[in-house]
Amino acid sequence: MKGYKKYFGKKILWFLITLVFAVILNFVLPRLMPSDPVSAITGKLAAGMSDAAAVREIYEHYQEEFGTNKPMIVQFGIFVKNMLRGNFGKSFSQYPREVSDILATSVGWTVALQLPAIVVGWLIGNILGAMAAYLRKGFDKVLLPVSIFFGNIPAFAMAVILLVVFGVELKIAPLAGGYAADMIPNLSWPFIKSVISHYQLPFWSIVLISIGGQAIGMRSMSIYELNADYVKYSRFLGIKDSKIVGYVFRNAMLPQITGLALSLGTMMGGALVAEKIFSYPGLGSTMYKAVLASDYPLISACTLIITIMVLLANFILDIVYGFIDPRVKAAQLD
Amino acid sequence: MKKMSKILALLLTLAMVCGMFAACGGSSAPAATEAPKATEAQAAAPAATEAPAEPAPADDNTLPRNETLYFAGQQWGPVNSWNIVGTNQNNSMAIAGNAGGYRSLMFETLFMFDFMSGEKKGLLADSYEWNDDLTEMTVTLKDAAKWSDGTPVTAADVAATWEVALLTNNGTGGSYKAYVDTVEATGDKTLVIKSKLNDAGKPVNPLKVEDFLTGTPIAQAAWIKTLRERCNDDPTAILNDKGEDVVWSGPYTKYFADEQKVVLVRDDNYWGQDASMWGKLPVPKYIAHNIYADNAAGELALKAGEVDVCQQFIGNIQNLWLEDDLPISTFYDEAPYGVCLTMPTAWYNMNIPVVKDNVALRKAIAMATDYEAIIANAMTNQSPTFAEVPRSLMNPTAGEQALYDHEAVKDLQWAGNDIEGANKLLDEAGLLDTDGDGWREYNGEKISLNAVCPNGWSDWQAAMQIVAAAGDKIGISIEPEYPEWDIMQTRFTDPSQTDYAIFMWSPDAASPSMPWGRCNQFLSSEFVGLQNNWSGNWGQYVNEEADKILKEIPLTTDEAKKVELYTELVKIYLTDVPSFSLMYRPNLFHAVNESVWTNFPSADDGRNIPPADCTDGYGIRALYELELVG
């Protein structure tokens, strides 16, 4: 148990050190962009104004409010202080909306789209990959090219193909939005139906691509394991095939689980391409707009969420691996 | 055998691909079942027209198509607040616009500007009158005008709106405090607006005071008092207040807003149904704007009939009805399809010595540029050509064109694509290619410039490419450059920037103070050296004579004298070429899909309603005259 304690302690320490650096980078990187978001806010307000002194006053007002006239280190201090209280400040691009309010309205859509898509893609992909490795022959010959085909279609192309085929041509799926353009959100069957129908294309545009990638990965790992010495030895000993297959796939699954955990970690980044092409609400398009507008508070908050999720996913994986695969813990302690 | 297995593999591959798509299509079943519903709703439209008294909505959660007017191209993100005093709320359907046409769906101005006639038409106010020396303007409010809570709109409301504008330096304060001194209520329905005076005791700019009439949305004094009290008179808190409890005077109010849409609903108690105003309510019960990811998504929705009024640039728009046979139309049946009010312009950066020192260089590039190609390709002919409307400081409207002497400046105007003339000008100015590399030099160095506009603004990018191509033909190296908008705006509003030699930006379009305001933006040195300059003269050009004339025009009431002064300004502009316009362009695009609603304004309908998106300035009259198809 002492070994585990040392292992956990080390992991937590690294987790915290990484977090500190991540927070610093989250703060600094957006601010290195060669643009001035306060100027953009001023521009929106100053449309039609011919009194230059008044425009200047407006600029200075927002500089003061956002603190961009203060030295970077002071701004960082304020950022950290507010961050610890869960306050990310006001958005530049959606001023005067609070960043936390923007995230709260986007995050639900992203989780609802990404979580099932990642899990379904992962499950189907791994099952197909394992089957291809085990059954081989015709199934493998079909699955491999299909997987390579789907796995390599760029996300934007897949989204556009689905949009054009099912939305524009066949007209069996809606073109844009998270629910029907003529509806007001409410808890009723027609609204839920509308949400489900708008969900289809973004969902499948993510799933189809991830199935391909997962299947290829699982197939390769399974083939590698099926040819491992322990399998040959087990067969030689006359152990039942079903038993061997169980061992093989458990081993082949390990890297796939890492992949799943990391996908779930990066999930909060949103499915940018799907969200953009289907005008679907979510964190991805929110962050995209924030980057284009140099919206520091919003970018920092989005990237912080992603950072923390990825770090947590890694941390949990490390801990879980420590339990399920003692080799990992031993190697780390060395 | 091997061949058989290959065929089998191929068949299985096909089966799997089809299977996956079938799964996708199958899961889309709800959408398929929904489709007929939409058709039913549309089919129900005629029935609704038969009994227009009170068409009951299907349920509270669906906007009946035949009562809802859908927009695109105005709202690009979620609505942030409804506070009419705070003026940066990203609430494009309720709080937007300027003196050229305030969007008066929810909040109203004293007058509505009609950019077609240049008239100010009464809204909350009936009339205004200047005193002789233009220092005081008396405004009379409409008797019928009321707030949504039933109380009358009074002069005290206008005074309170001005007071809070000064306190917070909001859009109204920033726009007019240099020109408006005081706004005093002299009676319930009368007020006096005093001009700010200069050192000589003359009004600074009466034209900008007139802009106040059409550009300032009036808020209720009682609500302003509540707002100020809850914010303890803190300007920042007042600007940031969400204004959920705001009182309005317009025909619509908030109904619903989220990340995907904003919906306004008609206020059936609206005061404007009084005979002294519209005499009726606007026709659509709901005004809805779905938030699209980009222009392409909005255009797709317009084509699909999901959008009725679209304020977006659509290239080759005529193809939508000529080739696609869609019920889509624009204000004019023929090119330029819309009313062009502004002139996207290439500005020369005078911080760059070779540009500042060589008028011949500036004029040569302007002369060599092929404007017909820009208008045909970048604008797909949605602009008059410079042969049709020769270049000056004026937009193509008849009112502005009448303000200068065309004959007097004829010799100074150029039509473009004049390579020979441009080369001759450069040769005469001594800007020669001395080392024979094909590029001209200045002080021994190759003249190398860039032509900049924001990335993704495709029509502008095409224009910059054509400017660069003109440079190639006259031995001036011009490299097109497309930074992200966010970066570009930071640079070009910096008065000391030397990154962009030629850059593209638009002056303002139309308002009561135009074309003076635009001339000021093109030529006034009052903007030179100002940090975060969003106001004008982005190229830092200085001309004392122009400054003098620009100060004189607002105080000139004699029309002939005005023409003389404007003609002088045009002469200076065409001689010194501190910038050159590349095209004319509508301020608002106005494409409508008439599959549900019809009777939108058009050029030849005799109604004289400006194509202002059915919402801005006097353009809002369109909403009162819409009809359902069939």
Image (tube, rainbow, N blue to C red):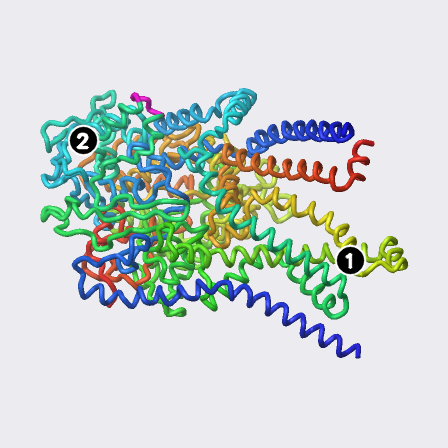
Please state which amino acid type lies under the numbered disc 1. Answer: Val
Image coordinates for residue A145, horizontal then vertical, percent: 70, 65
Query: Which quadrant would the N terminus of chain B be assigned to in this image?
Result: bottom right
Nearest the viewer among A230 and B594 is A230
Q: Look at 27% across and 35% down and name the residue there.
A: B245
Output the chain of dot 1.
Answer: A
Residue where numbered disc 1 is placed: A245
Q: Quadrant of the C terminus of chain B?
A: bottom left
In magenta, the rendered stretch is B232-236
Amino acid beneath label 2: Asp
For this view, does A16 lie left or right of residue B625? Answer: right
Q: Residues within 10 Å of mark 1 (few under 14, many from 20)?
A: some
> Residue A311 lies in what quarter of the image?
top right
In the picture of the structure, the residue carrying the numbered disc 2 is: B157
Residue beneath the point at 74% across and 70% down:
A138
Task: Report the residue at 27% width, 40% height from top.
Answer: B99
**x then y, percent, for residue A84:** 53, 25
**Residue B538: percent from left, percent from top:** 43, 35
The picture quadrant where one finds residue B375 is bottom left
Q: How many marks?
A: 2
Task: Tell me, yes or no, if residue B613 can be seen here.
Answer: yes
Mark-to-mark CA distance, 1 and 2 = 81 Å
Q: Are marks 1 and 2 on the same chain?
A: no
B179 drawn magenta = no
Instruction: From the image, give the main secondary structure of the stretch colored magenta.
Output: loop
Q: Residue at x 16, y 26 (%)?
A: B184
Instruction: Label 1: state its secondary structure.
Output: helix
The disc numbered 2 marks a residue on which chain? Answer: B
Looking at the picture, how far across and down is residue B8, in whole percent? 71, 75
Query: Which corner quadrant of the image does residue B133 belong to?
Result: top left
Taking the image as drawn, is residue B549 in sight? no
